[in-house]
Image (tube, rainbow, N blue to C red):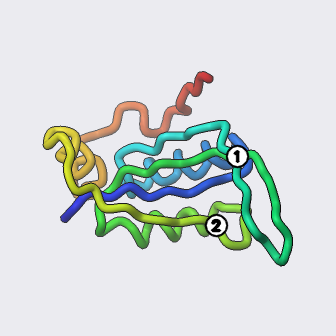
Amino acid sequence: MGAIVVVTTVGTEEQAYLIAREIVARRQAACVNIVPGIRSIYRWKGKICKDGELLLLVKTLEGEFEAVAATIRELHSYEVPEILSFAVTRGEQTFLDWIAGSVDKDAEFADEDEEEELAYED
């Protein structure tokens, strides 16, 4: 099963962290990068809007797309959240293996700090 990158944007750092944490905690993805400082210009309900956003880059497998999308829809404040998927056509094999192992819900390994609150530094 191939690796994909799912992207979404959110309006606040708190929402970015919540969505990222839940996706990783639910083993739907290996990693979520949060990229601040995005400026979005878009058309919404007949008006052109400009907003500051944060971009989330979700590293996962094709088979996890629906679960990732469902988590984003569940936790997202936008009426129509951006949820786009891009296939990874090439990548470092050890990194791709890490993604696969991280989303394996049957893996027999314990995450030492899975229940521990993550430290988040700017």
Q: Percent position (x, y) of residue 57? A: 47, 48
Taking the spot 53% from the left edge, 64% from the top edge, the residue there is 71
**Residue 92 horizontal side relative to residue 31, left or right:** left
Q: Name the image quarter holding residue 91.
A: top left
From the viewer's perspective, is residue 28 above or below residue 47? above
Taking the spot 42% from the left edge, 32% from the top edge, the residue there is 113
Disc 1 marks a residue whose amino acid type is Arg
Front one among 47 and 108: 47
Q: CB atoms at circles 2 and 1 under 8 Å apart?
A: no
Which residue is the extreme one toward the left? 93
Front one among 110 and 103: 103
Taking the spot 52% from the left edge, 70% from the top edge, the residue there is 70
From the viewer's perspective, is residue 62 above or below residue 14? below
Disc 2 marks a residue whose amino acid type is Pro
Residue 81 got which mark? 2
Q: Quadrant of the C terminus?
A: top right
Taking the spot 61% from the left edge, 48% from the top edge, the residue there is 18
**Residue 44 horizontal side relative to residue 111, left or right:** right
Dot 1 surroundings within 10 Å: few (below 14), some, or many (20 or more)?
few
Q: From this viewpoint, is residue 114 visible?
A: yes
Residue 75 got which mark? none
Q: Is mark 2 on a helix, strand or loop?
A: loop
From the viewer's perspective, is residue 66 above or below residue 18? below
Q: In which quarter of the image is the N terminus?
A: bottom left
**Spatial CA span between label 2 and label 1:** 16 Å
Residue 39 got which mark? 1
Which circle's residue, 2 or 1, is located before the other in the chain? 1
Q: Percent position (x, y) of residue 62? A: 30, 66
Dot 2 surroundings within 10 Å: few (below 14), some, or many (20 or more)?
some
